[in-house]
Image (spheres, helix red, strand yellow):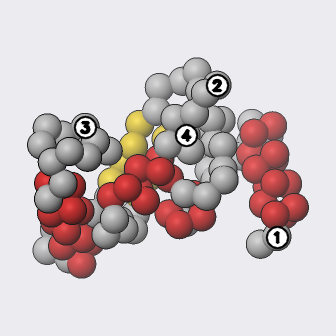
């Protein structure tokens, strides 16, 4: 998708009340988007690096956000995604001086 196409779709999402869902891959959501028009974030494909996820979610938590934001993580037990979440915890807790993007105490 070109930058112009992406901007056109994003503008439509912001201005058209009939558009209630905006699908973005985790990697694309981490780069240069401002999604303060959104209030829900659903993560279906967790990434091994929790900071990439946090950056993507932060696209909704930007200056100008006036609504509460809810983040949903959909993970099925005993799957690859479940193991990725365990790896995220390992990454998070192996660095005690790093701010935890999930707001868990380290």
User: Which residue shows up at 50% across the image and 53% down it?
Assistant: 56
Q: Position of residue 28 (x, y in %)?
A: 60, 64
Query: Disc 3 or 1, which lies upstream in sequence?
Result: 1
Query: What separation in Å lies between label 4 and label 2 (alpha carbons)?
Result: 9 Å
Q: Which label is found at residue 106?
A: none
**47 or 81: nearer the viewer:** 47
Residues tagged 4 and 2 counted as in contact (Cβ below 8 A) = no
* Circle 4 residues within 10 Å: few <14, some 14–19, many ≥20: many
Query: Disc 1 or 2, which lies upstream in sequence?
Result: 1
Q: Position of residue 2 (x, y in %)?
A: 82, 70
Q: Which residue is mark 1?
A: 2
- Where is 61 relative to 45, above or below? above
Query: What separation in Å lies between label 4 and label 1 (alpha carbons)?
Result: 21 Å
Residues tagged 2 and 3 counted as in contact (Cβ below 8 A) = no
**97 or 19: nearer the viewer:** 97
Q: Position of residue 3 (x, y in %)?
A: 81, 63
Q: Which residue is mark 2?
A: 64
Query: What separation in Å lies between label 3 and label 4 (alpha carbons)?
Result: 17 Å
* Quarter in which the C terminus is drawn: top left
| Left or right: 44 as drawn, with respect to 21 | left
- Where is 80 relative to 77, above or below? below
Q: Which label is found at residue 103?
A: 3
- For residue 36, what is the image quadrant? top right
- For residue 25, what is the image quadrant? bottom right
Query: Disc 2 or 3, which lies upstream in sequence?
Result: 2
Query: What separation in Å lies between label 1 and label 2 (alpha carbons)?
Result: 26 Å
* Circle 2 residues within 10 Å: few <14, some 14–19, many ≥20: few
| Left or right: 76 as drawn, with respect to 38 | left
Q: Which residue is mark 4?
A: 60
Q: Position of residue 93 (x, y in %)?
A: 14, 54
Q: Secondary structure at mark 3?
A: loop
User: Which residue shows up at 55% across the image and 40% down it?
Assistant: 60
């Amino acid at each position: 998708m070109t930058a112009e196409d992406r901007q056109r779709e994003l503008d439509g999402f912001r201005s058209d009340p009939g558009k209630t869902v905006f699908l973005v891959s985790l990697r694309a959501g981490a780069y240069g988007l401002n999604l303060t028009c959104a209030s829900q974030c659903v993560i279906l494909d967790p990434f091994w690096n929790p900071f990439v996820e946090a950056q993507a979610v932060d696209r909704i938590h930007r200056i100008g956000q006036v609504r509460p934001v809810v983040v949903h993580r959909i993970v099925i037990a005993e799957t690859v995604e479940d193991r990725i979440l365990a790896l995220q915890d390992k990454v998070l807790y192996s660095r005690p001086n790093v701010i935890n993007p999930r707001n868990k105490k380290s």
